Amino acid sequence: MSPDPRSPGHGRSHRRHEGGFRWEAVELLAYKDDGSAPFRDVTRQVLIERPELACQLRYFEVEAGGHSTLERHEHVHGVMVLRGRGRCLVGEELFELAEHDLVTVPPLTWHQFRAADDAPLGFLCLVNVERDRPQLPSEADLAELRARPEVAAFICD
Ligand code: MN
């Protein structure tokens, strides 16, 4: 199988970091294209994708005060914080995030990333290329999550 010519890095063994968490020949994308899920101030860059790897390495950046979608899915995430500060929800646990911290999101586990109010949160995220679509919480799921006051405070906008 030949590499998809649309894949970032096709035919290139090295792409420079251009500063500001932007990389040569890497497009800056909307976090989600379809407008189907709530989020605020997030960008996405696909850094590495090769068919042989069956996974993608992406860089997401959440602006100060912004957040990713509260979601869950069968596929897992491997995350490393590269820039800034924030917090995340994984299951029923909240974690403070600092540069170079690692986060693993297991299957079917609610998760959300939030930047600090005064700093962005940029992170690498490793996922399978073939993956299920994220599920959004139902009202019943939200009620269950809100049973923990600290989680209720975290997921409210
Ligand atoms: Mn996710």
Image (cartoon, rainbow, N blue to C red):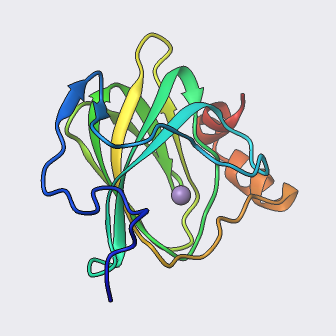
Q: Is residue 131 visible?
A: yes
Placement of 51 over or under 90, stated as above or below: below
In the rendered view, does 135 fall on the left or right side of 67?
right
- The picture places residue 97, in percent across and down from the top left corner, at 33, 34
Residue lying farthest to the right in this orientation:
139
User: Can you say which quadrant of the picture contains the C terminus?
Assistant: top right
Q: Is residue 91 visible?
A: no
Which residue corresponds to the image point at 74% horizontal and 59% vertical from the top-left? 136
Which residue corresponds to the image point at 32% horizontal and 76% vertical from the top-left? 3
- The picture places residue 84, in percent across and down from the top left corner, at 32, 23
User: Can you say which quadrant of the picture contains the N terminus?
Assistant: bottom left
In the rendered view, does 42 fall on the left or right side of 140?
left
Residue lying farthest to the top in this orientation:
118
In the rendered view, does 122 fall on the left or right side of 141?
left
- The picture places residue 139, in percent across and down from the top left corner, at 86, 55
Which residue corresponds to the image point at 18% horizontal and 44% vertical from the top-left? 15
Which residue corresponds to the image point at 65% horizontal and 70% vertical from the top-left? 133
Placement of 23 over or under 102, stated as above or below: above
Q: Nearer the viewer, residue 31 or 153?
A: 31
- The picture places residue 62, in percent across and down from the top left corner, at 49, 30
Q: Nearer the viewer, residue 85 or 51?
A: 51
Placement of 113 over or under 130, stated as above or below: above
Residue lying farthest to the bottom in this orientation:
1
**Quarter of the image where one finds residue 135:** bottom right
